[in-house]
Amino acid sequence: MSSLTTAPIAPLLDRLFAEAEASFAAIPPAFASMTEEERTRLLTSRTGYRDVYMGMKDAALAVSRETGTLLYMLARSIAARSIVEFGTSFGLSTLHLAAALRDNGGGRLITSEFEPSKVTRARANLVAGGVSDLVEIREGDALETLGRDLPETIDLLLLDGAKALYPDILDRVESRLRPGALIVADNADWSQDYLARVRSAERAYVSVPFAADVELSMRMG
């Protein structure tokens, strides 16, 4: 038995994933009707990402069920106690990671979200899941909130916010990643600069595409 597969988290996740699927209707029609090329250009913009994500404040933009389970498994497998997440949204990925911390015996998860209404909903979901004591949500621009007061060592980093900022967030966290730390980057194909960095032979990472939309990397030193 695990926190992920028992109450209160398991039924909560069932409800939240159903709501997440329904929330796709909240994506603005102008964005939904874009071509893949237009959508990619907008999502990879380093200047327009705020407007894009604020326009989708009512959409969950959640990880898939499979990615959520992967996050739990990875955090458990490395006995993670210190986790940083970029992009809280409604807290589905956060719940998976916090469940892993609970089953690892405790720890701390720092996550960042700049949309206030999503912060409110995420906090309520974490309380409902019984894991709010393990999570610190930092409201505001992650370039600032994840640039200070981080743990001395970080076991796992999840990148699932504005894709164009993946390299910048890694800049702020990298020095705290312990050898063997894992980085999970969702939809990393929208951040080619990030992929070039973690896949470069000159960088201290081993990195591989995992499943359809995840890049899994390990810090080597």
Image: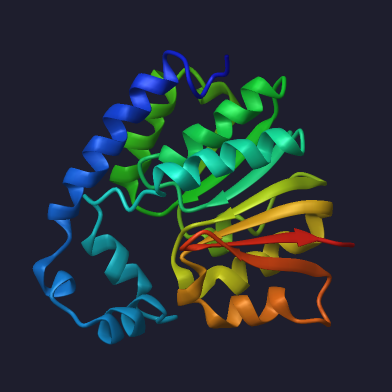
In the image, taking residue 26 as reference, residue 205 lies left or right, namely right
Question: Which quarter of the figure is the C terminus placed in?
Answer: bottom right
Q: What coloring was used for the rendering?
A: rainbow
Furthest residue in direction left, as rendered:
29
Task: Please identify the residue farthest to the front as the structure is shown.
Answer: 211
The reply, left or right, for residue 193 in relation to residue 130 is: right
Q: Nearer the viewer, residue 191 or 111?
A: 191
Q: Which residue is drawn at 46% across and 63% down?
A: 212
Give the x, y percent position of residue 114. Answer: 40, 54
Task: Single out the residue that lies furthest toward the right.
Answer: 221
Q: In which quarter of the image is residue 101?
A: top right
On screen, residue 85 versus residue 125, left or right, reads: right
Vertical side of 25 occupied by 91: above or below: above
Residue at point 19% right, 53% down?
Answer: 24
Q: Looking at the image, is 47 positioned above or below residue 166?
A: below
- Residue at (66%, 57%) from the top-left corner? 183
Residue 124 visible in this rendered orientation of the protein? no
Quarter containing the N terminus: top right
Q: Residue 139 location in percent, x, y?
A: 45, 47
Q: How many labels does the image show?
A: 0
Which one is nearer the viewer's eye here, 75 or 70?
Answer: 70
Residue 52 makes an appearance in the image:
yes
Name the residue: 41% across, 22% down.
10
